[in-house]
Amino acid sequence: MNRAVSLDVLRGLSIFGMILSGTIPFGNVLPAWMYHAQCPPPSHAFNPEIAGITWVDLVLPVFIFCMGAAIPLALGKKLEKGQTIGEITRQILTRFSVLVLFAIYIAHIMPHAIGKGFWNLNLLGTDVKGYDLQIFTLLGFLLMFPMFAVIRDAKKKIIYRIAGWGGAILLLLIFRFTYGQEFSLHRSNIIILLLAGVYFLGAISWLISRNNTTARLAIFIFWAAVQVLSKHTGLGIIIENYQPISWFFKLSMSFYMLLLIPATMVGDIIAKRLKSSEEFSERAGNGNSKHIFFAGVLAVSVWLTISLFARWTTAVFIVTPATLIFLYLLVTKYIPGYRQMFTLAAYLIIIGLMVEPVEGGIKKDYVTVSYLLITAGISINLLMFLDYVVAYFRNSRWVKLFEGAGSNPLMAYVMSTWFMFPLLHVSFLIGFYNVLYPSGYPWIGVLRAACLVMLIMVVVNRMVRKKIVWRV
């Protein structure tokens, strides 16, 4: 089965946004729409009373959407190869467990989490405090290659995995007995932990309902009911504070099932297309209407982000439905190959807007139903638009760049914090990097961050070309 290129590109773009949002200058230097809506400048203190979303609030749901859309592709392929439901379930559980361990591991090898460094070095005016900590973080990153690299030879794979995980355990023991680090299962990377939980619930849900749309809808309603129960009875707080399980599962993870279930529906559509080898021209036709339609789905996504952030509530409730109706008529008459996906996106957006006032407006934190539904609709729109882009610019360097990063997401995610910045410190190039952001010029700081993230994308893409890919 061929890969869904537009899905890889969308995943690559979400990773780019995820890394960029954590690298841009903070403080009272950039407008509020450059940060999470609930963490505005200058203090970036979390304020759950602020409603709205920014582009930063889209990167996580878009990534989760891509993960959900990939579930039918990956698990469907396993079923076609003759694997049993029991075997696939064990693989899902194994992947969940490894992702949880990965989340714990990377949280413990960050420089500030290791302890107080012994080496504070200076070179040509550049101070690097905790030089040894930076080296250990780099070493921890390098151990991820034998831990997660795709290795076809079964015997070599066992040797590499033992070396990788054994080295990781040894590293943590060094931190414990040399730097006094207290190992804790409750110290983990929240993003990876969230993805692990959502993947597990989503994969099991798809496996149960893979041939039954009614069952998929019932599961969607079930998770919606769990969210209501959790928020309005305090059940979520009780479970999240229950120490024996809170280190690997939080009930709030299940909230994202309202985003992931529609993503698996899109994944089913993509899987059918890949099996039939249907070309873009067959789905979109040859008329000029397709240009208007795909520009329209992108415009709706941009409009929703801007209007919901600016709280143009009247305008968003008038303009959005009118635009969606126009696009629906267009896709029905001229581009029937995208009718099913667009209809799902439109339903999610409309329902999301209808419930938006119920929880005090759309919010990423604490996550609201409107946030999950609307970002799911936006994700589908972006995927359709990228279908269009890939069809016309398949051989573009930019498409290939984000496609490569999107096909190797685990490596791309950790490349910044666990490789690039430690490398800058160890090489003392951090001084040069800091000079590239002159005081009083925050947008130059954004450009600096964008260049760094692009470099990461290039490195990951080169790894993919050399067939060095991480999988859990």
Image (cartoon, helix red, strand yellow):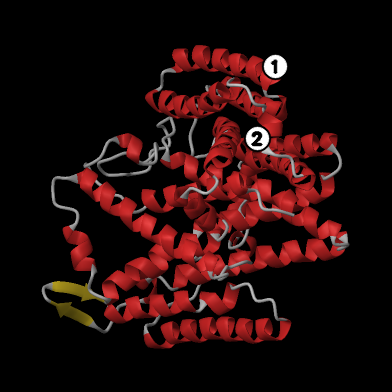
Please tell me how crowded label 2 is: few (under 14), some (14-19), or many (20+) other residues with Cα within 10 Å.
some
Identify the residue at image location x=74%, y=46%: 274
Residue 224 drawn at (x, y percent): 69, 36
Label 2 sits on a secondary structure element that is helix
Q: Residue 257 at what x, y percent from top left?
A: 66, 43
Query: What amino acid is found at the position of numbered circle 1 in the picture?
Result: Lys
Question: What is the x, y in percent for residue 263?
Answer: 67, 41
Q: Please name the residue shown 57% across and 15% down the image.
A: 321
Name the residue rendered at 42%, 60% in the picture. 458
For the point 58% across and 86% down, the residue is 163
- Give the vertical position of 50 relative to 257 (above or below): above
In front: mark 1 or mark 2?
Answer: 1
The residue to which callout 1 is attached is 333
Q: In the image shown, does 241 or 377 lie closer to the viewer?
A: 377
Q: Nearer the viewer, residue 369 or 125?
A: 125
User: Is residue 56 depicted above or below 171 in this figure?
Assistant: above
Residue 55 horizontal/vertical position (percent)? 42, 38
| The quarter of the displayed image where residue 214 is located | top right
Query: What's under tag 2, amino acid-wise?
Result: Val
Quadrant in which residue 420 is drawn: bottom left
Q: Earlier in the sequence, mark 1 or mark 2?
A: 2
Quadrant of the image occupied by residue 53: top left
Q: Secondary structure at mark 1?
A: helix
As displayed, is residue 317 above or below residue 342?
above
Q: Which residue is mark 2?
A: 228
Tally the numbered discs.
Answer: 2
Would residue 466 appear left or right of 28 to someone viewing this image?
right
Q: Residue 318 vs residue 426: left or right? A: right
C-alpha gap between disc 1 and disc 2? 39 Å
